[in-house]
Amino acid sequence: MASFFKGFLAAPLSAKFGMLVVFGYAVISLFAPVIAPYGETEILGASYELWSDKYPLGTDNLGRDMLSRLIFGARNTIGIALLITSLAFLLGSITGMIAATVGGWTDQILSRIVDVLMSIPSLIFALLVLSIFGTSMPYLIGVIAILDSTRVFRLARATAMNVAVMDFVEVARLRGERLGWVMFKEILPNITTPLLAEFGLRFCFVFLFISALSFLGLGLQPPMADWGSMVRDNATLITYDDVTPLLPAGAIALLTVAMNFVVDWMLHKSSGLKDVS
Amino acid sequence: MINVLKIVAQRIALGLFTLLVISLFITFGVELLPGDLAESILGQSATPETVKVFRAELGLDKPAHLRYLDWLAGMAMGDMGVSLANKREISELVGLRLGNTLFLGGFAAAIAVPLALLLGVLAALYRNSLYDRAVNIFTLTSISFPEFFVAYILILFFAIKLGWFPGISNVSTELSLGDKLYRTLLPAATLTLVVVAHMMRMTRAAIINVLASPYIEMARLKGIRPAKIILRHALPNALAPIVNVVALNLAYLVVGVVIVEVVFVYPGLGQLLVDSVSKRDVPVVQACSMIFASVYIMLNLSADVISIITNPRLLHPR
């Protein structure tokens, strides 16, 4: 804990700001029901009420409290983005390590599949799948996780390749250790740092991707509060010179910016370079 | 020269193969559905007769491989089938919108590419200065903004508060070019803001990379002005990675256009695609995704080919 705190103090201003913001978002999404003044789907007043003491940020198109929905939106959007990113990492890093350790045909086949998947624009791919299966959560999560795991696969394979040729891995193989041992006990501990930095970047990407899908009306389905669809539902207010619909969009932007600052600093630190361009 | 032609031919073959795989996926994706599309879309209230008619309309009663060949042949000849939602010819729906989307993408590219090159060269020239750091923060920020956020901010300021531009880009064929450009300026600006950051970062990195080489040191020792060193000596050698990144970003533009079109209610292909997805109008979605994927792959392919033919090391392999 103390070393963590020391690391925090040594970080540059942008990274400090980023970590504070990420921490704030985590607190808000964990304690959403306690913080929010009203319920997530409670219909309270008229639609599009102005900012007042009763409704700090006004109400949305159905008369639900905007602030409460913003707070619950943090929980839903961030939770799903985390779930998808974790799934993508599980899938991508395991297949990537398998490709690197086993090599040969397994590597060839996996890599070619990933090549093809990566050459399709992911938004188009997701839209296609959603039109076939309809917009349901499990498919949404599965599709984005698979699409995103291709990037993780590339990184995990490339980094694991470098480790797999080292002597201690060779020794473990000669000792007759099983594939699982070689992968998780010998290789994985040596590639965690680049994978962790990539996790931050992938999270941002997934987060923006879900928000974009929700904004198109194809992501999380109502009545769940979600930042992307909140922008979409209240967008008409902008024509009346009201900034309220920009708040959820701003919340998305703030989190991704903060995350990028943190990752930038992590990469900077781990590469040990003064000027990473 | 023969070698280069061989590499280029290989890349093109790979691109065509990818397109083939995508077309297979687009058509056979429907097969993955439990039951079939007819039952899934018509729902439980459908009678066996309506399901049968629906299947015949989509050709679902034919075996899958025949359906695929029919579809592929149709796509190649411009006959993309009929929309489920309004029974119109898809080629008719797509034709005009594709033109609009390409117009918007081209407009955005025409602003973004020169701007990104200029800003990138300047950032490399004044490296580690205040300007460079400001640019770095700006790019990091604009990479992490969702497209619709940028779009609505622009609408709020330039369409609502200042009233300079229309908030909705309603273009039609009757408009003159100037009018069309005026109405599409805001969406084009949004796309520009989104892609310029990445392109600029890569331009800066490519030039800084070249600046570290001995011949630049020599030029500097001769006393040539910094601006001339960058423009005459560094830029030509950094061109290959820059061209590559430009083409990749144009490919990204093709996809980014979907969301921007929805925000500005621009009558383009992306809007049609999103509408059709929510209506589950599968034939239209298939046609649109195929078009988007082909353009995307073609741009990626040209990025590959250009970077091969502009790279002297690949031109004369050892």
Image (cartoon, coloured by chain):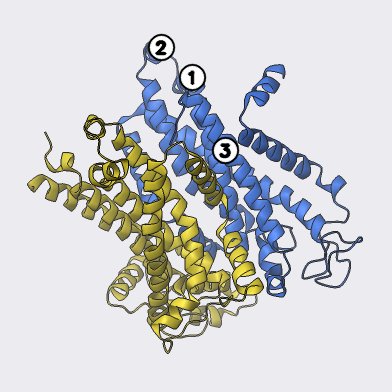
Of label 1 and label 2, which has the lower sequence position? 2
Residue A6 x, y percent position in the rendering: 68, 20
What amino acid is found at the position of numbered circle 1 in the picture?
Trp
Q: Rounded to the nearest whole Å, what is the CA distance between mark 1 and mark 3?
A: 27 Å
What kind of element bears circle 1? helix
Eye-nearest disc, 1 or 3: 3
Q: How many marks?
A: 3
Classify mark 3: helix, strand or loop.
Answer: helix
- Quadrant of the rendered structure where residue B161 is? bottom right
> In the rendered image, which quarter is residue A21 located in?
top right
**Chain the render paints yellow:** B
Q: Nearer the viewer, mark 1 or mark 2?
A: 2
- In percent of the image, x 52 and y 70: which residue is there? B186
Name the residue tied to disc 3: A200
The colour one sees for chain A in the rendered image is: blue
- Residue A272 is marked as none
Q: Is residue B126 left or right of residue B278?
A: left
List the residue tagged with mark 2.
A168
